[in-house]
Amino acid sequence: MNPTQTDTSSFSPPPLFGRLRFVLVETSRAGNIGSVARAMKTMGFTDLVLVTPKCADFVNDPEAVAFASGAGDVLNSARVVPDIGAALDGCNFAAAVSARLREFSPPVWTPRAFAEHAGAAPELRAAIVFGNERVGLPNDIVERCNVLINIPANPDYSSLNLSQAAQVLAYEARMASVSGAPATRGVGFQGDAASVTQIDGMYAHLEQALVAIGFLNADNPKKLMPRIKRMFARGGLELEEVNILRGIARAILKDAPPR
């Protein structure tokens, strides 16, 4: 090999490229799926999951193919799943993207804060969740995510289309990967992050226990469970912490009087 050449045979991309998933929920137009595939590929990302897209045959849709513009491999490998639970399977951190802030949303982060967090935690398998072009994400999906990403655009005109929002997130994630994210400051022992599925199971178990002791009315839960979810989302739950909370719920159910 020429001494002036660089040996790239052993090069492997920074780990975030293989740990970050883009999730599109009920996308209406095939062209937008193609545009997101292109936005992802230009920044080095490939994992695209679609939750019940309105355009069934998007892979062969002329608009999707044209808008993908060379990112046909990302488009063709996109997986279609029936619900958000399946889309987040294998992930232990989920971020909802929305221009609309919610009363009981998880903590609100900027794209850069999310990218730096994901880049600094090699054990994190993260998903970025985008909603339908017209109505965005429903509250129940936002509430099950760890954070809500709000892009700080012009407050007088903050309208970004789906692929523009995906491009912003993909760019920030790439910069956090190739530039090196700042080191996190741990507080003692840090365990494995709980997956979204494990946290959902814990919430269901906890809600069952609260109903059993009469603290929560199952027919009228109102805002209690969203508040509890927001409270836990602020800190991020480890698997052992989820197991502790489920153990508490199990003990409550064991001793709770029949209702």
Image (cartoon, rainbow, N blue to C red):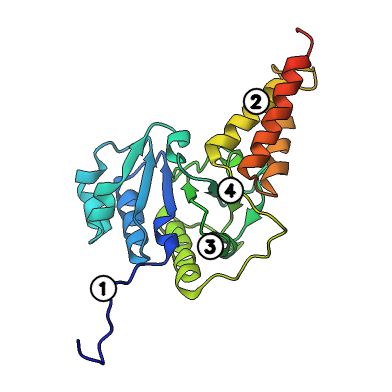
Give the distance between the C-alpha atoms of the residues marked 4 and 3, in whole angstroms: 19 Å
Residue of label 4 = 192
Which amino acid, by three-letter code, is at mark 3? Ala
Quarter the C terminus occupies: top right
Residue of label 1 = 9
**Residue at figure coordinates x 50%, y 41% from the top left:** 135
Mark before the other along the chain sequence, 2 or 1: 1
**Residue 149 lies in quadrant:** bottom right
Give the distance between the C-alpha atoms of the residues marked 2 and 1, in whole angstroms: 49 Å
**Residue at figure coordinates x 20%, y 49% from the top left:** 62
Mark before the other along the chain sequence, 2 or 4: 4
Q: Tell us which disc is closer to us: 3 or 2.
A: 2
Above/below status of 179 relative to 104: below
The local crowd at label 4, few if under 14, some if 14 to 19, many if 20 or more residues have their Cα within 10 Å, is few
SS at mark 3 in the image: helix
Q: Tell us which disc is closer to us: 1 or 3.
A: 1
Which amino acid, by three-letter code, is at mark 4? Asp
Give the distance between the C-alpha atoms of the residues marked 2 and 4, in whole angstroms: 20 Å
The local crowd at label 3, few if under 14, some if 14 to 19, many if 20 or more residues have their Cα within 10 Å, is many
Residue of label 3 = 115
Mark 2 in CB contact with mark 4 (< 8 angstroms): no
Identify the disc placed on residue 205: 2
